[in-house]
Amino acid sequence: MDHSKHTPLRPDELASPTVDGANVYGPDDSHIGDVSHFHGAGQNAQVVVDVGGFLGLGARPVALNVSSLNFMRDENGKVHATTAMTKDELENLPEHEH
């Protein structure tokens, strides 16, 4: 997917209603997880991403600082994120406790 034509989200859009459920893509553009929920708002927020598993079963939540993700909208308005982290790196993070 060519993300260069996608519109970055504004800081005021970085909140649960906008990003919950967003797909997260790794450096090789493979789908590596989905945003489960958001803690806080803006640039200091924590994003909980479900990684691993298959079709949502067996996925494990991990928390990232929002600055680790680049949130954007595609041509159809769908929100997604990219990260420099690989799926293995995310899976090796400590599990997020709710």
Image (spheres, rainbow, N blue to C red):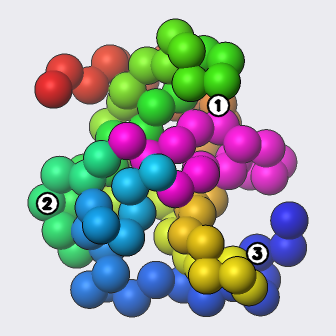
The kind of secondary structure element at disc 2 is loop
Dominant SS type (magenta): strand
Residue 67 in sight in this render: no
Q: Nearer the viewer, mark 1 or mark 2?
A: 2
- Tag of residue 46: none
Residue 53 x/y as whole percent: 60, 16
Q: Look at the image and say whether residue 94 sits in the magenta stretch.
A: no
**Side of 50 where 79 appears, left or right:** right
Give neighbour class at mark 1: few <14, some 14-19, many 20+ (Cα, 10 Å): some
- Residue sitting nearer the eye, 2 or 59: 59
Give neighbour class at mark 2: few <14, some 14-19, many 20+ (Cα, 10 Å): some
* Marks 3 and 1, how far apart at CA: 19 Å
Please report the bounds of the magenta region as a residue range: 22-36
**Side of 1 where 65 appears, left or right:** left
* Marks 3 and 2, how far apart at CA: 26 Å
Q: Earlier in the sequence, mark 3 or mark 2?
A: 3
Q: Which residue is mark 2?
A: 40
Check whether the beta carbons of the residues at disc 3 and disc 2 lie within 8 A of each other.
no
Q: Look at the image and say whether residue 27 sits in the magenta stretch.
A: yes
- Tag of residue 3: 3
Residue 1 x/y as whole percent: 86, 65
Q: Earlier in the sequence, mark 3 or mark 1?
A: 3
Amino acid identity at mark 2: Gly
Instruction: Name which residue lies at 61% across and 81% down.
Output: 77
Above or below: residue 64 compared with residue 93: below
Q: Which residue is mark 1?
A: 87
